Amino acid sequence: MEYHIKDPGLAEAGKLRIEWAERSMPVLRRILDRFKKEKPLSGTVLAACLHVTTETACLVKTLAVGGAEVYLCASNPLSTQDDVAAALVSEGFHVYSIKGEDTETYYKHIHACLDVRPNITMDDGADLVGTIHSERNDLVAGIIGGTEETTTGVIRLRSMAAKKVLLFPVIAVNDSNTKHFFDNRYGTGQSTIDGILRATNRLIAGSWFVVSGYGWCGRGVAMRAKGMGARVIVTEVDPLRALEAAMDGYNVMPMGEAAQIGDFFCTVTGDINVIRKEHFDKMKDGAIVCNSGHFNVEIDIPALEKSATSRRTIRDYLEEFTMPDGRRIVLLGEGRLINLAAAEGHPSSVMDMSFANQALASEYLVKHGKTLSKEVHKLPQALDNEIARLKLESMGIRIDKLTDEQNHYLSSWEMGT
Ligand code: NAI
């Protein structure tokens, strides 16, 4: 199977949108220009399981220019942009992803990318690595290593490493400062609100907006909801993060209390069943519930389905469940990441840094993978810093340099007052 996509006829539309994204990805462009000359990924077969978006297309092209043979499948059944898949196929790439694919097709597509016997895996959520470890041990000998894009994937991989079952090294791209500081916070913040707006067309101003999880993503979502005039409530399980949310000016309370107040609910915890039956039972008529964490497990959808007496789809990505007492609860995007299901995911400018990390991580694996232990590694700090420097440069922002005197002062203890 060369490819499996929705409609090759969508290629032209996809190409234009990719061109638009490319313009906001100057750091990745710099890497592409260098890769063109140096071909650091020559001879590498790379399987990528990522959200198939315009930004991913730019990454795939960069990797290919660097010499890799790239095979791409989706990292979520609802996040594929079918026109982008078509555009990539029209340029000769092997893409296996269709927006709305069922679970069986999702895994068939993952296997299609594994059947080519990759040397490098690139994951967003660790589904490639998970499948290799559970079903395709035969591939391990040929794999130099993998890269991982998101918090949930890194958590899964760290759990494998701790149990000593991880069979090759993986670079946690999410751990780079130029990734999670910006992508998780500003990217998820903006695009989650974008997804909610596209799905509902509701006014955020004046509403009660509940954000579950005040990590990197939650901070971004809360900040943007507040910026649009919402009265924001944060729910947390970590005292430090809860304290931070309180001092950032948000209302902090348990979900059991927030459930009665919220107009919008958005989970971004990476955890399971954060909103469940006891919470649905307390929600107001018309409460809108969605998730922007990696998996669709943060909202207990089976419990909602079980409680409801009827359900109907009112708009794209908007399903209404009627409860026995007549209250209606609205679920967006089947509980999958709403920013990718109903909107287009993170803006390109922020993915520029995330995917610069991915490109440099694959180069790093080719150069050093054989010497790395079978654990989860960070990309070296120097590369992370260089991405920040290039991004600043592309934004026309200049900063100060330490003077010799300051360098000396900051590395000494003798000088007091
Ligand atoms: P994080 O680890 O920085 O934050 C998660 C927070 O959720 C923590 O503060 C934790 O204490 C809290 N939490 C855990 N269980 C909870 C519960 N039951 N109730 C309330 N709070 C709870 O993680 P980060 O980077 O913010 O990522 C969160 C999720 O979003 C992950 O699944 C990650 O993979 C995903 N993600 C999604 C993106 C998107 O495009 N939608 C982009 C980046 C990450």
Image (cartoon, rainbow, N blue to C red):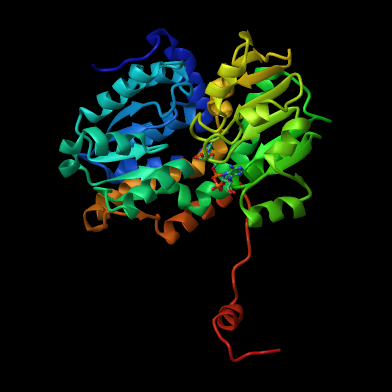
In percent of width and height, residue 377 lies at: 36, 55
Quarter of the image for the C terminus: give it: bottom right
Q: Is residue 381 above or below residue 360?
A: below
- Occupied quadrant, residue 148: top left
Q: Residue at x 40, y 59 (%)?
A: 380
* Left or right of 216 in this view: 225: right
Q: Position of residue 265 (x, y in %)?
A: 68, 31
Asked if 382 appears above or below 123 in the picture, the reply is below
Residue 295 visible, this orientation:
yes
Between 37 and 382, the one nearer to me in the picture: 382
Viewer-closest of 257 and 21 = 257
Could you tell me residue 138's position as x and y percent?
A: 15, 37
Q: Most extreme residue toward the bottom, as rendered? A: 414
* Ligand 1 falls in quadrant: top right
Quadrant assignment for the N terminus: top left
- Eyeballing the image, is 322 above or below 215? above
Q: Quadrant of residue 97?
A: top left
The foreground one among 27 and 183 is: 183
Q: Is residue 104 left or right of residue 279?
A: left
Residue at x 55%, y 28% (from the top left corner): 300
Q: Which residue corresponds to the image point at 40% horizontal and 55% vertical from the top-left?
A: 378
Residue drawn at (52%, 29%) of the image = 21
